[in-house]
């Protein structure tokens, strides 16, 4: 009796990406995407990208889906096709691809602002892209800012962060409070870093 060959299972993962070109997507593509109720990120319009010959690429958006459970590429395409998505890429690193939406780790490419990323259905872009080292950079920036501007009051720093710098505000709320309070106290007592 001959054994039947089994087909390998389709590869499954939680995260998939596609590209959307504004001129070929439905006008309401963002609403259609939101209606699927899958957490996702939409990049800012990539309208400054160039190819290896330094010619402008066609403006486009990157869309990153983050399913709650593993899916096949065919299941992801069910979301991408109605919005005019071109291609369906399995994403190996959620943080890596999320950072790619603005080319954060690609200084040779056009840079896009993180506050222009659209997060749908409960997705947290800043929480996804932040690295531990980002916290230290923010604390260093705050220390220098306080020293340069004579700020010695924590409430004043919190107000400035709340109104002008979401990254600083997040660090102060999450984990940077103690070090900044101690730094401000030292400044108030007369210590000035050289």
Image (tube, grey):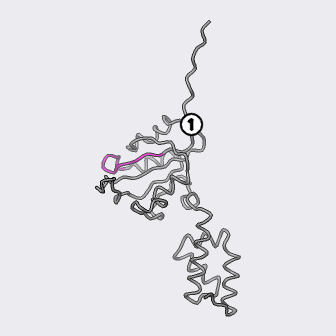
Image x and y of residue 3, in percent = 61, 12
Q: Is residue 150 above or below residue 163?
A: below
- Residue 52 relative to residue 2: left or right: left
Image x and y of residue 112, in percent = 42, 63
**Residue in the picture at 63% in, 90% down:** 192
Pick the quarter of the image with the N terminus.
top right
Residue 127 lies in magenta, yes or no?
A: no
Image x and y of residue 130, in percent = 58, 62
**Residue in the picture at 50% in, 52% down:** 97
Q: Residue furthest bottom?
A: 190
**Residue in the picture at 47% in, 65% down:** 115
Nearer-the-camera pick, 42 or 38? 42
Residue located beneath label 1 in the image = 12
Q: Which residues fall within the magenta stretch?
A: 17-27
Task: Give the SS element for disc 1.
Answer: strand
- Residue 76 relative to residue 187: left or right: left
Count how many numbered circles sit on residues in the image: 1
């Amino acid at each position: 009796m001959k054994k039947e060959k089994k087909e390998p299972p389709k590869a499954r993962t939680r995260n998939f990406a596609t590209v959307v070109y504004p001129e070929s997507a439905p006008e309401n593509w963002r609403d259609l995407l939101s209606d699927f109720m899958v957490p996702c990120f939409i990049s800012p319009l990539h309208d400054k990208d160039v190819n290896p010959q330094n010619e402008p690429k066609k403006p486009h958006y990157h869309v990153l889906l983050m399913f709650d459970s593993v899916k096949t590429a065919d299941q992801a395409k069910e979301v991408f096709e109605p919005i005019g998505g071109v291609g369906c890429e399995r994403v190996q690193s959620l943080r890596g691809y999320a950072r790619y939406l603005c080319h954060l780790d690609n200084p040779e490419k056009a840079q896009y602002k993180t506050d222009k990323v659209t997060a749908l259905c409960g997705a947290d872009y800043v929480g996804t892209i932040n690295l531990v080292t980002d916290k230290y950079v923010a604390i260093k920036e705050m220390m220098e800012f306080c020293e340069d501007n004579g700020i010695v009051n924590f409430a004043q720093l919190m107000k400035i962060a709340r109104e002008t710098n979401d990254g600083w505000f997040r660090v102060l709320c999450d984990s940077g409070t103690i070090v900044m309070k101690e730094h401000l106290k030292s400044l108030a007592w007369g210590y000035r870093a050289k």
